[in-house]
Image: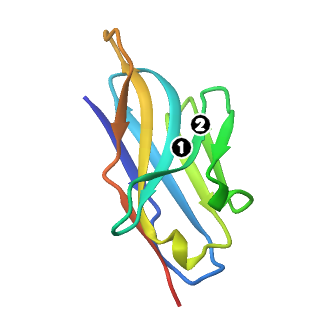
Amino acid sequence: QVQLVESGGGWVQPGGSLRLSCAASGRIFSINNMAWYRQAPGNQRELVASISRGGVTNYADSVKARFTISRDNARNTVTLQMNSLKVEDTAVYYCNANLRMIAAGAWYDYWGQGTQVTVSS
């Protein structure tokens, strides 16, 4: 089995920073894209940022220049550095990984359990 475990959520005032981390563990052969999504109450889950195995990144327009995604392929981890946080960044943030397990022939998406980020004064 595969597990994605997130950490680093919490409460912060507007303008503050938080760092989210996600570690994938289990019988993993290889990880393709890794990403962070978020879902605010009453909204659909949306892509925040993604990063390919080679380090190519993609960001939602709403977080460009404020958030930075990075990964460590050797440790199967992905990190989201969030700066200049706004009230509208409040949401549950989910880690996502497209990966292939050992002895498996296909690639599947796996999700973490989510971590709450609250931005308020």
Tell me if mark 1 has few (under 14), some (14-19) or many (20+) residues whose alpha carbon lies within 10 angstroms of its own: many
Residue found at the very far bottom of the displayed protein: 121
- Residue labelled with disc 1: 78
User: In x, y percent, where is residue 10?
Assistant: 44, 72
In this rendered view, identify the residue nearer to me: 59 or 75: 59
Q: Which residue is mark 2?
A: 72
| The quarter of the displayed image where residue 84 is located | bottom right
The answer to whether marks 1 and 2 mark residues whose Cβ atoms lie closer than 8 Å is yes
Q: Amino acid at mark 1?
A: Val
In this rendering, would 2 be left or right of 78?
A: left
Residue at 57 percent across and 41 percent down: it is 50
Q: Residue at x 62, y 58 (%)?
A: 81
Mark 2, Cα crowd under 10 Å, few <14 / some 14-19 / many 20+, is few
* Vertical relation: 91 (above or below) 70: below
Instruction: List the single residue furthest toward the left.
Output: 1
- The colour scheme used to paint the residues is rainbow
Image location of residue 4, percent across then percent down:
36, 42
Give the number of marks: 2
Q: What residue do we see at 60% from left, 30% from top?
A: 52
User: What number is the disc on residue 116?
Assistant: none
- Image-based side of 35 in relation to 99, left or right: right
Q: Is residue 106 above or below residue 51?
A: above
Q: What amino acid is labelled 2 in the image?
A: Asp
Q: Nearer the viewer, residue 116 or 42?
A: 42
Label 1 to label 2, Cα distance in Å? 6 Å
Q: Quadrant of residue 56?
A: top right
In which quadrant of the rendered image does the N terminus lie?
Answer: top left
